[in-house]
Image (cartoon, helix red, strand yellow):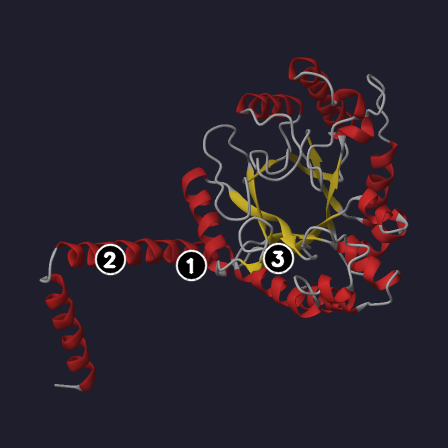
Amino acid sequence: MKKSQKKQAGVILGLKRYWQRGLWQKSWICLSVIILLFVSGMYGVAQWYIIRNKDKPLVFGATFIPGYAESFGLSAEETLDATINDLGIKHLRFVSYWSEGEKLRGTYDFSFLDWQLEKARKEGVSVSLAIGLRQPRWPECHMPTWARQLAKSEWEQPLMDYIRATVERYKNDPVIESWQLENEYFLRPFGICPDYSRERLVAEYDMVKSLDRTRPLIVSRSNNALGWAVGEPRPDISAVSVYKRVWDRTITKRYVEYPFPAWFYANLAGWNELLHGTDTIIHELQAESWLPDGFTMDTAPTEELYKSMNPERLEDRLDYAVATGIRRIDLWGVEWWYYMKEKRGEPELWKTAQRSLQNYR
């Protein structure tokens, strides 16, 4: 008998003896087999998804928020131009904050968004426009000052009217590739939001679909890993955020690295395609620091910032995202990279992004 066969026989004999010891041993073996089959199934779906989509074009995009750039003392116009022409980003997610577009009740002012879309149109950039109350960046729900003290019954219709006005204004603009409705809508632990009702999300979805049936409507999952879109609405495209290293303020009080392998997200995307026939995108790939309480992005020492995101980690995150097999990846943090380059004289993040994105083209 060969050595490998002897080893295999020894394992089988050992399991048999363990099985015969009693109920607890049988339970542990059964549980181990179930876990093994479950993980193997996840991995199989992940590999199916990766192979199925490997010939689709790989598109790196980015979220761009003018107010975030300006919070660093940057020119929003210069930051957007550098993102497009220096980094070579040709797909952008813009926001249509209610707090910006209707500062006075009943008076809409879309100038904050018009210039961005004009720039995108001029540069040949496609745009996914976020709409709704909950949109990217803190406090997540961007409600105008006049609406904050109102009951839901009083602010819900003005919000619907604002969403309608936004879609009707831009639905004929060819630069708009898709709409993203709300942002991680059911993520209760993060953000300052007055409502999480499914009824409102469905009503918004139905209204947007009635206004524009030509563009895909994106709805994002609840969080980084465990949330899942159950029930209505059923989006044309699902979106997931991918965060790897964050500060845990609740239990460990330290930086935590999520242990999920890249194929975990391929599994999520694969099941979404199998069950719903729709694809998945990464709408937020963590590419900026996640700081402990008491620090801010513009005042924290570089040493602290680099504990959760530095040039080496940035390159690793881009490779990780590609390894998921998901072919549309929107980066999160381009404004911060530009700030580090322009205001702190530390261009390494920007240069790393330039090099890595060029390698993937």
Q: Indicate which disc, 2 or 1, sits on the residue closer to the N terminus.
A: 2
Q: Residue at x 73, y 42 (%)?
A: 127
Q: Position of residue 319 (x, y in %)?
A: 60, 65
Q: Considering only vertical position in the picture, is 315 above or below 134?
A: below
Residue matched to label 3? 58
Q: Position of residue 117 (x, y in %)?
A: 82, 40
Q: Position of residue 113 (x, y in %)?
A: 83, 36
The N terminus sits in image quarter? bottom left
The C terminus sits in image quarter? bottom right
Q: Residues within 10 Å of mark 3 (few under 14, many from 20)?
A: some
Drawn side of residue 317 relative to residue 100, left or right: left
Residue matched to label 1? 47
How many numbered badges does the structure rendering display?
3
Q: Indicate which disc, 2 or 3, sits on the residue closer to the N terminus.
A: 2
Q: Considering only vertical position in the picture, is 96 above or below 329?
A: above
Q: Residue at x 72, y 63 (%)?
A: 304
Q: Residues within 10 Å of mark 1 (few under 14, many from 20)?
A: some
User: Looking at this rendering, what residue extends furthest in the bottom direction?
Assistant: 2
**Element marked by disc 3:** loop
Q: Give the amino acid type for the residue marked by disc 1 in the picture.
A: Gln
Q: Considering only vertical position in the picture, is 306 above or below 328?
A: below
**Element marked by disc 1:** helix
Residue 360 in view in this figure: no
